[in-house]
Amino acid sequence: MPSIDDATLTLAGRLQATAAVATVVAREPLSDALVEVTLATDPRLVGAPGSDVMVDVGKGRTLRRRYSVRRADPEASTLTLWVGVDHEGPGVDWVREVVPGDEVVTIGPRGKIALDPAASWHLFCGDLSALAAFSRMVEALGPGRDALVALEVDALEDAPSPAPPAGVGLRLVLAERSGRAPTDPEGLSRALATLELPPGPGHAYLFGEFHVVRALRALLADRGLDEAAISHKAYWRAGRANADHGEPDKSEPA
Ligand SMILES: Cc1cc2nc3c(=O)[nH]c(=O)nc-3n(C[C@H](O)[C@H](O)[C@H](O)COP(=O)(O)OP(=O)(O)OC[C@H]3O[C@@H](n4cnc5c(N)ncnc54)[C@H](O)[C@@H]3O)c2cc1C
């Protein structure tokens, strides 16, 4: 049974977050590429739409991976994660192996990116790793708002479509990767080109592979979006495992 060590408590304190042992209550594949895991844990970990939790997936040593909260059930004190399993890594090993009843050390809520309350339209752009965050954020939009979603997937059936609440317009464009390298922004660039940005104040959220996020930031800036209206985060980096604290390497490409 995992326990919360002093280093984890110190880290959680420094991050102004909560450390808790979570119990796996369900694990269900949603597609060949995505697995849903539900954890019973301290409700304080849930955070706002856009936030994530750190999960210690290490075997015998601390190795944290970050996963966005897809949804939360406050009455059951559970939160749900959607974990992409189309690569090899300790996070994927964890989600392939967990069974209900397993326990895992978690820290949360993490993350600084939340919905922009001043925006009348919201553009979500990224890959499968971003779908949990995007889905929760879309579901949290108020009536009269527009959600534009551009998502790159290996296969169209990999990704459940985000379901907006009543009164929220959704425009969803799925880009099939079609064998392109994970660092290639072409698929999402083309998807974005098909999306007309509505009038009024808007906000873009870019989550995904390091090089792709960089390229799309520049592209949206070229389309006239203000830097302050673009929230971006590299979730992973092709060819380089995320560090033990869960962050991808953000050093400049050679
Ligand atoms: C704030 C935040 C929120 C995140 N939310 C989610 C989430 O909700 N769901 C989710 O699935 N992921 C999410 N991620 C991404 C996830 O944490 C990383 O993909 C993580 O690297 C996976 O760990 P791993 O041990 O499986 O692979 P690692 O050991 O990190 O990587 C091994 C190799 O696999 C490849 N790789 C890594 N990640 C991916 C990927 N996502 N797709 C394709 N190839 C990859 C790389 O080439 C890497 O060299 C999030 C990341 C951050 C920072």
Image (tube, rainbow, N blue to C red):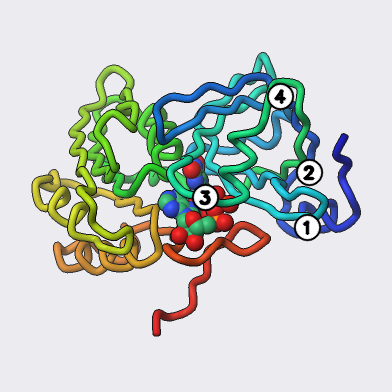
- Observer-side mark, 3 or 1, equals 3
Q: Amino acid at mark 4?
A: Ala
Query: Is 143 left, or right, of 30 in this rendering?
Result: left
User: For residue 11, which numbered disc appears in the image?
Assistant: 1
Mark 3 CB within 8 Å of ligand 1: yes
Vertical position of residue 24 compared to residue 87: above or below:
above
Judging depth in this view, the residue of 94 and 252 nearest the camera is: 94
The reply to whether the C-beta atoms of the residues labelled 2 and 3 are less than 8 Å apart is no
Q: Which residue is mark 4?
A: 40
Question: Does residue 16 appear in the picture of this structure?
Answer: yes
Q: Secondary structure at mark 4?
A: strand
- Observer-side mark, 4 or 3, equals 3
The reply to whether the C-beta atoms of the residues labelled 4 and 2 are less than 8 Å apart is no
The reply to whether the C-beta atoms of the residues labelled 1 and 2 are less than 8 Å apart is yes
Cα distance in 3D space between marks 1 and 4:
21 Å
Cα distance in 3D space between marks 2 and 3:
27 Å
Which of the two discs, 1 and 4, labels the residue nearer the N terminus? 1
Which of the two discs, 1 and 2, labels the residue nearer the N terminus? 1
Judging depth in this view, the residue of 85 and 78 nearest the camera is: 85
Q: Position of residue 30 (x, y in %)?
A: 43, 24
Q: Amino acid at mark 3?
A: Glu
Q: Position of residue 217 (x, y in %)?
A: 28, 64
Task: Name the residue: 53% across, 21% down.
Answer: 28
Cα distance in 3D space between marks 1 and 2:
9 Å
Q: Which residue is mark 3?
A: 88
Which of the two discs, 2 and 3, labels the residue nearer the N terminus? 2
Cα distance in 3D space between marks 4 and 2:
13 Å
Q: Secondary structure at mark 1?
A: helix
